[in-house]
Amino acid sequence: MSTDINQKRPRIADQVSASLRRRHARERRFRLLGLVATLLGLTFVAILFANIFIKGIPAFWQASITLDIYFDPAIVSIPPEPVREAKESDSDFRQRRVSWENEVGMVNFNRLIQNALTAKIAEAADYPRDAARIVTSGERLALRDLVIKNPGIVGETRQMHLLTDANIDVWLKGNIDRNLPDEQQQLSARVRDWADQLYADGIIKMRFSTGLFTNPDSRSSLASAGLRGAFMGSLYMMLVVIALSIPLGVAAAVYLEEFAPRNRMTDIIEVNINNLAAVPSIIFGLLGAAVFINYFKLPLSASVVGGLVLTLMTMPTVIIATRAALKTIPPSIRQAALGIGASPTQAVFHHVLPLAVPGILTGSIIGIAQALGETAPLLLIGMNAFVASVPASPFDQSNALPVQIYLWQGNELRNFFEGRTAAAIVVLLALMLFLNGLAIWLRKRFETRW
Amino acid sequence: MVTTMKSDVEMELTLVPDVSGLLHEQSERSKRIKMSASDVKVFYGETQALHGVSMEIMENEVISFIGPSGCGKSTFLRCLNRMNDTIEGARVEGRIILDDQNIYDTALDVVQLRAQVGMVFQKPNPFPKSIFENIAYGARLHGLAEKKADLADIVESSLRRAGLWSEVKGRLDQPGTGLSGGQQQRLCIARAIAVNPEVILMDEPCSALDPIATSVIEELIDELKRNFTIIIVTHNMQQAARVSDRTAFFHLGDLIELEKTADIFTNPKNKRTEDYITGRFG
């Protein structure tokens, strides 16, 4: 017997080595394929990021002009700031104050800017229409606010950095073809010459654009269009999503995973939750419009409605992530707790759920990050409306970051808003990166080693 | 099938000669019936796992359940503290009396039962918390300690009784999962006795341990039977012979034989018991 086997052995070895070459070749091919796929993916990501950053980073710096604004009392001729009188009621005083502020608003602050410009460019006085194109129209409001805050400024001269018109920013950054004929240029030849001159003199400079973060969207003064309104809208939505989807989702998952009997009913629920996670997000928008706006009469364009819609969208993700996390907790832990005399609820809340927290957090934050980037459902509940104010509460009209990106990329002044859009994308990406980083940090922090 | 203990033991013990003295001592004390089961049947869905098991378990005895895999010994053990309740589709018939109380009575709270009948599992399963928290959990759960000092006392005495105190006293705040397998299992025993149960169920407590850790646990069982009634399921017949006063042999969901350990290993009455013990199957 044993000699028989010994005789066969060499032949088997030959067979193996023959097939071995084929097996190795197949393995090499497979690895190569994987490597190519990975490199291809990385290349696309690199191109995408490079594109966004090359366009977006310059948009964080914006052309602004340094002018010595003289708050001429002849132009800023306003009554003295109201002082509260002894017997005056709150509302009376407030009314007087508002009417005073309105009066300040009537002042022609453009004249102040014009005068200051004339100090830099002598001809500006002769061409007021051209001169008015230099500084973006929204900056007169900055002067107004300054006077309202500090009426004592009248009669003084202040050096201020004012944003130039968006077209000047485009012109100076070279985002428009300088060889285009006059009739195709947004700015007159004179304004273009002025801009070049002021830029060469260092009076116009590229400065970090804080307005991008502190201003709401604007259509009348494009250069001052900012992300603040959209950012606050997104923030309110995320607060609503976090406050609703995590408690509800985790509670539903704990019930389904730990307490619900396994029967036809729970099977159907499980299948439907999985299906819900795959429903196109725009359908949740339709649902939100029908239920929250038409039926519950919640305000249109409000971030609370957006938050509710995104909660519906995020909840299946949270439930699935939580159930997956609960499944990874070994049953021996439940048995140990039950064996000592813990009730099933105590076993879950003292032991199983705390151990599942890292998984739950990771899944939930990924779901929330997804909701943060969601645009489609928001279009259907009116959050794509132009809103030129910063929402003060979730019930105010507002935008959201991804919708702002969508609106800006459709703006007529492409050359300017291409950069702004990319800058907004950079902000959104930074937020996402922050959230994902938070998820990883939390997972590492709460992770238990067995 | 149900046997009660005879008052004196004058047996030849070929397998475990050193047990005879203990056995004698044991029989003097344990006259009282701690738990009694009558006609216990267990169904998992459609399949019947246990076909009517009846037995009486004496106070302060160590009784071991042996038998081949799937014979129902673990199933029966899990009936005794109603851990089968946690298995979906499991159904238990028959009566199990603890002292004077039917444990399947709807009036009885299962939490109270499990405080009285503790359990140690096959795989050491400490909570992924500190050693202190592992022991303190049960005491806190049942409100056994009012002050922090009381809790510390319970933790220390439980660890001492489990023979683990000297090994862990300096690192009570470290995770229980960082101990060796044998230490983890003794931690689980300490955790079980911290709530001061009357009966301790052990489901193959040494099957995941090396021989040295096993012998430590076996010595511990000997120690513990002064205060507790211990019911142990084991695959290891030598272990049954070493630690238990009486041994029950299960086969295919039936209790075949329950005798004094010495009897069952030297002079089994049933053919199947004999075949199993002599290694013809199982």
Image: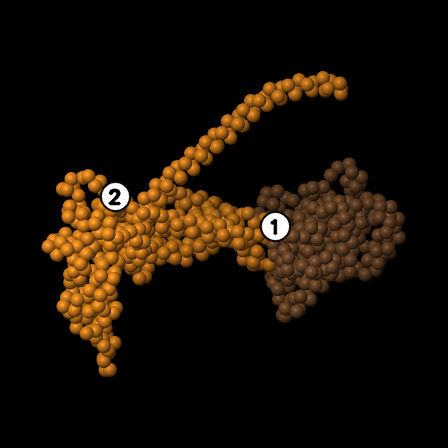
Instruction: Give the mark, 1 or 2, whose residue is nearer the N terminus.
Output: 2
Question: The chain drawn brown is chain what?
Answer: B
Q: Quadrant of the C terminus of chain B?
A: top right
Is label 1 in a helix, a strand or a loop?
loop
User: Residue A48: horizontal and vertical position, in percent?
Assistant: 37, 40
Which residue is farthest left? A126
Mark 1: few, some, or many residues within 10 Å (few <14, many ≥20)?
few
Judging from the image, mark 2 belongs to the subunit labelled A
Density class for disc 2 (Cα within 10 Å; few <14, some 14-19, many ≥20) is few
Q: Measuring 46% from the left and 49% from the top, which residue is drawn there?
A: A363
- Viewer-proximal residue among A141 and A134: A134
User: In the displayed structure, would residue B16 be above or below residue A15?
Assistant: below
Amino acid marked by disc 1? Trp
| Chain of the residue under label 1 | A
Task: Check disc 2 and report the residue beneath it.
Answer: A174
Residue position marked by numbered label 1 in the rendering: A450
Residue B55 picture location, percent across and down: 73, 52
